[in-house]
Image (tube, rainbow, N blue to C red):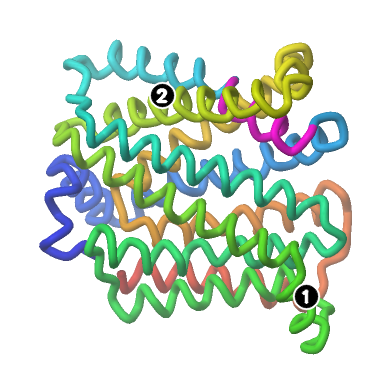
Amino acid sequence: QACSAASRPLVSASAISVFTATRAGAGRLPLWLALTLGAALLQTWRTALQQRLRGRFSVGTAGFVRYLYAMPVGMVLVAGALLLRGGPLPHIGWRFVLACAAGGLAQVIGTSLLIMAFGFRNFTVGTAYAKTDAVQAALLGAVLLHETLSWGAWAGIGLGLAGVQTLSLAGQNRATMLRASLQPAALCGIGAGAGFALAGVAIKYAVGTTNSSDVVLAALCALVVTNTLQTLMQGSWMAWREPAGLRAAFTGWRSAMWVGVLSGLGSAGWFTAFSLAPVALVRTAGQADMVFTLLFSRFYLREQLRRSDVLGLVLMVGGVITVLLFH
């Protein structure tokens, strides 16, 4: 396993057994990877809708609807898991709630920073820097969860990061990049990546505190608690600072709710994947959302692929394969 002995108590025994079993099956996709790819696809779809809402809603409102309308989705998923799988709800203690609150706040800040990056002129740079979340997650996981990664995993993370940068920053020369690295879009991107990395680490810790034999149900419970706290946190802030934006989140529910639905389903995949594998590996595989965006532009919008696009795609896929082989 990629986790060290010190971090194993944070992951339930069932999570390790499921992860090991899925790896053992010849030709089978690891469960955490399947969940991650599904979550990345939903995230790509959600981001497209969120960018469309950016023209109608403020940064705060566009982020708030993601949590508000994801909350009932998580509740339905928990109810469905209880009906299908049986068993009691996992133990939810104060450490679980605090970890969900920390992860939820980090995600709120990260989402707001990413949406802010969309508003800057050079938003591609902000997006590229946000994709440093895999590296930041590896560092945070090592410090906070005592996760250790093999040299192969680090190599895969590096390849994936190189692929993302190649896709995001194609056509920009070195001088432009040096100037862009100090622009607000880049700083927002780095902050967004840190927020997403910390959120993943916090959620993994929260699920581990339950000591539940059903890691899927524990992850879904973490989703509901986190979304509820996020709705209360950002909703309270908006009621104080942006009451008009708070009203817009409810009056525009017909379009805004789909962002929440996709977010809830995607987060269910992310949270469960975080519980089954090191956060850095999940974040590395999650960079597939860039691949989905590229394929969408090629086959749906009929845009031509550049050489840099193909190179970036090869590097990203190579990174994921390296992670799977050597983690």
Q: Is residue 276 above or below residue 212?
A: below
Q: What whole-number distance in Å separates the C-alpha atoms at marks 1 and 2?
A: 38 Å
Q: Residue at x 61, y 26 (%)?
A: 260
Q: Position of residue 198 (x, y in %)?
A: 42, 53
Q: Position of residue 103 (x, y in %)?
A: 41, 42
Whether residue 176 sits left or right of residue 39 in the image: it is right
Most foreground residue, 84 or 229: 229
Which residue ends up furthest to the front in the rendered image? 240
- Magenta-tinted stretch: 58-68
Q: Residue at x 48, y 46 (%)?
A: 106
Whether residue 37 sits left or right of residue 145 in the image: it is right
Dot 2: what SS? helix
Q: Is residue 297 above or below residue 2?
A: above
Q: Which residue is mark 1?
A: 180
Q: Which residue is mark 2?
A: 224
Of labels 1 and 2, the one closer to you: 1
On the image, which quarter does residue 280 sit in?
bottom left
The disc, 1 or 2, on the residue closer to the chain's N-terminal end is 1
For the residue marked with disc 2, what is the amino acid?
Answer: Val
Magenta segment, prevailing SS (helix, strand or loop): helix
Q: Is residue 177 above or below residue 186?
A: below
Q: Residue at x 11, y 62 (%)?
A: 5
Q: Position of residue 112 (x, y in %)?
A: 65, 44
